[in-house]
Amino acid sequence: MTTQSLSQFNNVAIFGSHGAIGNAFVEHFLTLPIQSLYTFSRHPCSILDPRLNHFILDITDEGSIHSLATSFDSALKFDLILITTGLLHNSAISPEKTIRSLSQNTLRTYFDVNTIAPMLIAKSFIPFLSQSTPSIMAMLSARVGSITDNSLGGWYGYRASKAALNMMIKTVSIELRYTNKQAIVVGLHPGTVASNLSEPFTKNYSKNPIFTPNESVSHLTKVLSELSVDSSGNCFAWDGSQIDA
Ligand SMILES: NC(=O)c1ccc[n+]([C@@H]2O[C@H](COP(=O)([O-])OP(=O)(O)OC[C@H]3O[C@@H](n4cnc5c(N)ncnc54)[C@H](OP(=O)(O)O)[C@@H]3O)[C@@H](O)[C@H]2O)c1
């Protein structure tokens, strides 16, 4: 059973709307005749559109996620919730090339942002997934989170935090079979995409195409439109192929 086509999604939520891919999703949905778009970011939003409701949120603050969710009317229902947040590097953190670079703080930060935050969002926002029509919660993961696919090594914290996210997605998909049979929860690999996150690592990169955020969103919207309840719990790449755990 495939879901309705993406152009028929009416109410969409996007966490990480200030990021490259998150923002491209926002722009994409505002070109469609959707009813409402809820966006969440640490940054304000300058887009003026009567369908857009923007909220400032630090996804690493559990209390803030919970407070925001409880401030919404429980009758609010989304067809699609996208979690487009993620961390690979910042001013204090670079992905580890060797085990000698592992640090407790860095590993904790990777897991906080890439694994724990998306799942706390899922905990608070799964009740807002539509139950009367098919609904999707999709989280941006990464191919490097595949244990099977790991032939290069390195990037310990990022890889492990995305592998753990994929396990969490699988686990919550099993619970949703009992609590919301219409819900699909998946991980998505957007491809290699030009963004702040990828920029330091794509300069001399020629193995795979480097997509613009808009190109990646165009691929991912097709993947989303082809999901079925049987897809739930899995991670899919930008071309629709399933990524091994
Ligand atoms: N770009 C690639 O080549 C690539 C490849 C594979 C997977 N991915 C995945 O795709 C997702 C989006 O990546 P991107 O390329 O769009 O990166 P990006 O432009 O750097 O955006 C990252 C997003 O993560 C959010 N974020 C990071 N740390 C946060 C924190 N501590 N608290 C709250 N929000 C935080 C930011 O939210 P704000 O809106 O609050 O700033 C931002 O929206 C990530 O999960 C990444 O792992 C990307």
Image (spheres, rainbow, N blue to C red):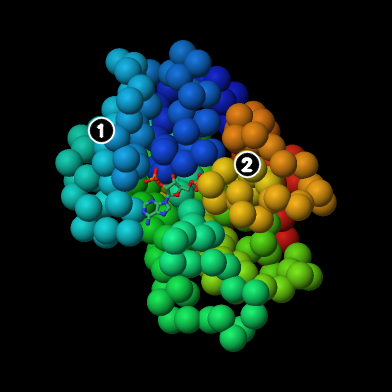
Residue 123 seen in the current view: no
Front residue of this view, candidates 185 and 93: 93
Say whether residue 25 is left or right of residue 218: left
When the figure is inspected, residue 167 is found, relative to residue 3, above or below; the finding is: below
Percent position (x, y) of residue 204? 76, 52
Residue at position x 64%, y 34% from top?
A: 212
Question: Quarter of the image holding residue 225?
Answer: top right
Ranked by sequence position, the earlier of labels 1 and 2 is 1
Disc 1 target residue:
75
Residue at position x 27%, y 58% from top?
A: 61
Disc 2 target residue:
194
Residue at position x 61%, y 49% from top?
A: 199
Percent position (x, y) of residue 84? 48, 45
Task: Say which amino acid is labelled 1.
Answer: Ala
When the figure is inspected, residue 184 is found, relative to residue 123, above or below; the finding is: above
Question: How many residues crowd around disc 1 within 10 Å: few (fewer than 14), some, or many (20 or more)?
Answer: few
Task: Say which amino acid is labelled 2.
Answer: Ala
Residue 12 seen in the current view: yes
Say whether residue 196 is left or right of residue 191: left
Q: Is mark 1 within 8 Å of ligand 1?
A: no
Say whether residue 199 is left or right of residue 25: right
Q: Of the residues tagged 1 and 2, which is closer to the observer?
A: 2
